[in-house]
Amino acid sequence: MHQAQAERLLFTPASPQADAVPLIFAFPNIYSVGITSLGYQVIWSTLAQRSDVQVSRLFTDAQETLPRSPELVGFSFSWELDYSNILTLLEQLQIPLLAKERAAEDPLIFGGGPVLTANPEPFADFFDLILLGDGENLLPEFIDGYQSVRSCSRNEKLEKLAQIPGIYVPSLYEISYEAAEGKISHIQPSTTAIPAQVSKQTYRGNVLSASTVVTEKAAWENIFMVEVVRSCPEMCRFCLASYLTLPFRPADTEKSLLPAIERGLQVSDRLGLLGASVTQHPEFNELLDYLGKPEFDHVRLSIASVRTNTVDEKLAQTLAKRGTKSLTIAIESGSEKLRQIINKKLTNEEILTAAQQAQAGGLQGLKLYGMVGVPGETRSDVEATVDLLKQVKKVAPGLRLTFGCSTFVPKAHTPFQWYGVNPEAKQRLQFLQKKLRPLGVDFRPESYNWSVMQALISRGDRRLAPLLLLTRHYGDTLGSFKRAFKELKGELPSLNDTVHADWSIADKLPWQHLLGPLPQTTLVKHLQTAQEFF
């Protein structure tokens, strides 16, 4: 793999022992995208540092020398529509796509990552095992567990591995429906040895991830990434990145953050600070002071989305001095009422102040993120967003203003998982386009059709597998999904029932047997609190 020649490793791979497990670890996209995924880097390096595993990497456009008879094939799955690449890679490896069709000599196919941890059910038929949660805990347990059952039959391996916390073996759970197109009636394990529920595993340490490889071939060229925080304390009610990854964990500054940054800056002058809410690290100011030292004047700093009310002139100045031209903040809406519904603790005043501070600190651009179609939203809430952006233009006229806007998509394990996609969102995006362009705001809407496809996957159950196999050949468009629904009519719930319908809290959810950080009773309480503001 010629890309590997440009790689600078920040770890020492082990020499595999004679009987090491031959394992392929794949990212279902091109190398430059996969190698920019911090999750993929960390899992790969963890495997490569074990002498009892011989790991080979596989991407859609590049691969290392692959073993002739791998025992394990794993996928890091972080973008919904990459499922078609997973199926293509399985075909290339001559492995049956459906778990039930694999024979004794076929490898076990495992997967992990945000898509599968949220709701693995649409993909359940393609995987033998799914690792739910954080790799720090799961991966060592999984490999140790596999070593202990290596000589067992395929079924025995699966039954024993299913008893490790966080390892979900979909084939060992029976799901029944009220009717072919109806709701789920029962989800139960096939034997008493299998746990009735599988809990997502949470790593609770305060030494968080950092890049294990730096390369100019990455999508962010030569970037060294450091995870500053995990999860987010804000708990916006639609937000998977907060609810699914709770509790909020900041990296230990002395033990984790600073040593990682020092290591990274020895091999690169590009630093990316990652996390859902980076500026909420309790020692973020000290981190800024550290990065503001003259010896780091050559460093280019990128920062993931920051919390609006943490934007001050010092932050803007440090970023501007370190090569960042613009700042990204998620405001969700210009309506105070709507922000109360979603639990976004933010006032319009704070948003305007952040814009002024960004301009005063020397930044050139401000990118705001918003959303339409949020439960409880009315037309006047959308108009409030236009009014707010007008005010931002007024108080910070020197900033290049970008407004990225998506449609609300319900996500598993969040209080808004029971709501469907609002079809009016399409018109609301068009309304914003019409109003914002004349204001000189660079409006970047996310495709409404893509939001519908995302919702289908985020809320779907196992009956989607035949549909995914069909759409793959028709192409990843909403038209293809609709065509596949027509073809499979009578075999699964309609597109409307899956995507647009609001579900009752009494309904059995496709992921009912997979436990996130918070119990359903808590999510219902958070939902009811939101509804008080409607």
Image (tube, rainbow, N blue to C red):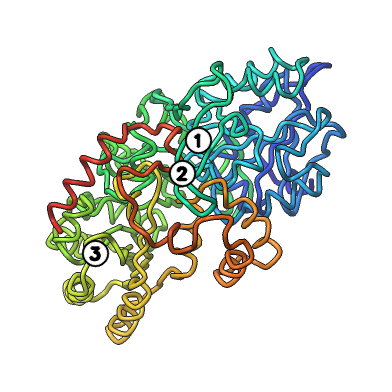
> Looking at the image, is 90 positioned above or below residue 257?
below
| Between 454 and 134, the one nearer to me in the picture | 454
Q: Is residue 458 visible?
A: no
Instruction: Tell me the distance, in whole angstroms, between the alpha carbons under discs 2 and 1.
Output: 41 Å
Secondary structure beneath label 3: loop
Secondary structure beneath label 2: strand
| Between 178 and 398, the one nearer to me in the picture | 178
Instruction: Tell me the distance, in whole angstroms, between the alpha carbons under discs 1 and 3.
Output: 33 Å
Residue to which mark 2 is pinned: 184
Residue to which mark 3 is pinned: 333
Badge 3: how crowded within 10 Å, few (<14), some, or many (20+)?
Answer: many
Residue to which mark 1 is pinned: 210
Horizontal side of 171 relative to 106 (left or right) equals left
Horizontal side of 125 relative to 359 (left or right) equals right
Q: Are marks 2 and 3 in contact (CB under 8 Å)?
A: no
The total number of labels drawn is 3
Badge 2: how crowded within 10 Å, few (<14), some, or many (20+)?
Answer: some
Q: Amino acid at mark 1?
A: Ala
Q: Earlier in the sequence, mark 2 or mark 1?
A: 2
Report which quarter residue 152 is drawn in: top right
Residue drawn at (70%, 16%) of the image: 147
Secondary structure beneath label 1: loop
Estimate the x, y position of residue 231 in percent, counting from the top left: 35, 38
Q: Amino acid at mark 3?
A: Ser
Mark closer to the observer (1, 3): 3
> Looking at the image, is 226 positioned above or below residue 309?
above
Q: Quadrant of the C terminus?
A: bottom left
Mark closer to the observer (2, 1): 2
Residue drawn at (71%, 43%) of the image: 98
Q: Earlier in the sequence, mark 2 or mark 3?
A: 2
Q: Amino acid at mark 2?
A: Ile
